[in-house]
């Protein structure tokens, strides 16, 4: 480290003034090196250079008041934000566990597991999300579930899972990847809504006059609605029974509007008034037979319906 805030007494004279000066200088140097690393990832510099910086030059000031090297987990957060796919792939391939471990307190707002899955969904990093899900295939089942079903901070993320984020921001590719790897549909966010219930609320809001929370300002309302309907179709593939609880009551309370929004067949099934069509049931069986260890690679072997074919699960589109 080119500076040291932990010298005896903190400074050359060993007194409190020297300690304060040394600490202030160390923090200043730390901020400079931290920003340099951030810029390097943002500018998509080569992986070897970023790793050299992370290992020997870049430090951040941690919660214990010490200059600390960036962990693979913290470096992956930067790679996700700036879509540095090569660096993200390297970190996940080389340090799969530590790259997905919780970052230090300065990089998160609560003690929840690592936020990488939800962050990949929020920024729509389909390629990196696919790499993350590939990396967790070898994790113990309990650890894999904990990462996939992580609940976000109630203040910042509404206490929702990555599935909630995908439904809120209309990310069908991310949603499909998460569902195929076993993310749970039954968990509620801080408001008590499952991903399906949240999506129905978003559809109802789309049908009204107000703006949709979380949607880009320039988003075409018709296109956004189509993406939400696609999300609903994807959720239907992994929902063996009708919508339960509040969602079903909401559908039945305003039948005419929901029949118009969803179509008669989908409304009847979600409201529990009729079983799903044979086509939907057949697709449920086909899709759910794919093991997470072969998802989404095995999709090419399935006779996919048209509404699934436009999905780009590679992250290159």
Image: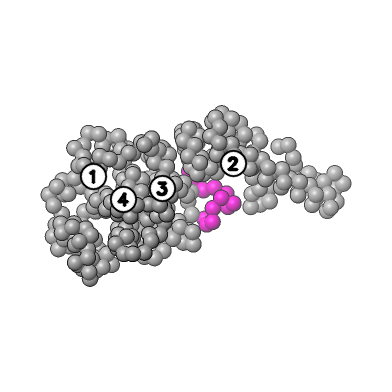
Residue 215 at what x, y percent from top left?
A: 40, 55
Quarter of the image holding residue 293? top left
Residue underneath mark 2: 38
Separation (CA) of disc 4 from disc 2: 34 Å
Separation (CA) of disc 3 from disc 4: 19 Å
For mark 3, give the secondary structure: helix
Q: Which mark is residue 147?
A: none
Other residues around mark 1 within 10 Å, as few (<14) / some (14–19) / many (≥20): few
Sequence-first tag of 3 and 1: 3
Residue, x 82% and y 46% (percent of image)? 11
Q: Which residues are magenta?
A: 98-111
Labels 2 and 1 touching (C-beta < 8 A): no
Residue situated in front as seen by the camera: 286 or 86: 86
Residue underneath mark 1: 307
Q: Which mark is residue 223?
A: 4
Sequence-first tag of 4 and 1: 4
Other residues around mark 2 within 10 Å, as few (<14) / some (14–19) / many (≥20): some
């Amino acid at each position: 480290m080119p500076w040291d805030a932990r010298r005896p007494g903190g400074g050359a004279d060993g007194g409190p003034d020297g300690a304060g000066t040394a600490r202030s200088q160390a923090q200043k140097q730390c901020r400079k090196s931290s920003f340099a690393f951030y810029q390097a990832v943002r500018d998509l510099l080569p992986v070897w250079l970023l790793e050299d910086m992370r290992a020997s030059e870049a430090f951040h000031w941690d919660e214990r008041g010490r200059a600390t090297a960036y962990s693979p987990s913290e470096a992956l957060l930067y790679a996700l934000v700036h879509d540095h796919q090569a660096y993200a792939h390297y970190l996940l391939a080389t340090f799969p566990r530590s790259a997905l471990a919780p970052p230090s307190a300065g990089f998160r707002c609560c003690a929840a597991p690592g936020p990488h899955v939800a962050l990949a969904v929020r920024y729509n990093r389909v390629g990196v999300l696919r790499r993350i899900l590939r990396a967790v295939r070898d994790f113990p089942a309990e650890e894999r579930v904990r990462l996939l079903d992580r609940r976000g901070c109630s203040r910042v993320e509404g206490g929702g899972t990555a599935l909630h984020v995908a439904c809120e921001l209309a990310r069908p590719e991310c949603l499909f990847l998460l569902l195929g790897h076993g993310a749970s549909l039954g968990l509620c966010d801080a408001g008590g809504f499952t991903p399906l219930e949240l999506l129905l609320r978003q559809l109802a809001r789309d049908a009204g006059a107000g703006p949709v929370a979380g949607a880009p300002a320039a988003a075409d309302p018709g296109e956004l609605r189509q993406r939400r309907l696609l999300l609903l179709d994807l959720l239907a593939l992994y929902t063996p029974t009708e919508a339960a609880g509040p969602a079903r009551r909401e559908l039945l309370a305003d039948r005419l509007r929901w029949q118009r929004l969803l179509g008669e067949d989908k409304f009847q099934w979600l409201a529990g008034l009729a079983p799903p069509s044979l086509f939907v049931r057949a697709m449920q069986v086909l899709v759910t037979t794919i093991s997470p260890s072969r998802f989404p690679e095995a999709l090419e072997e399935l006779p996919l319906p048209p509404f699934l074919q436009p999905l780009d699960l590679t992250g290159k589109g």
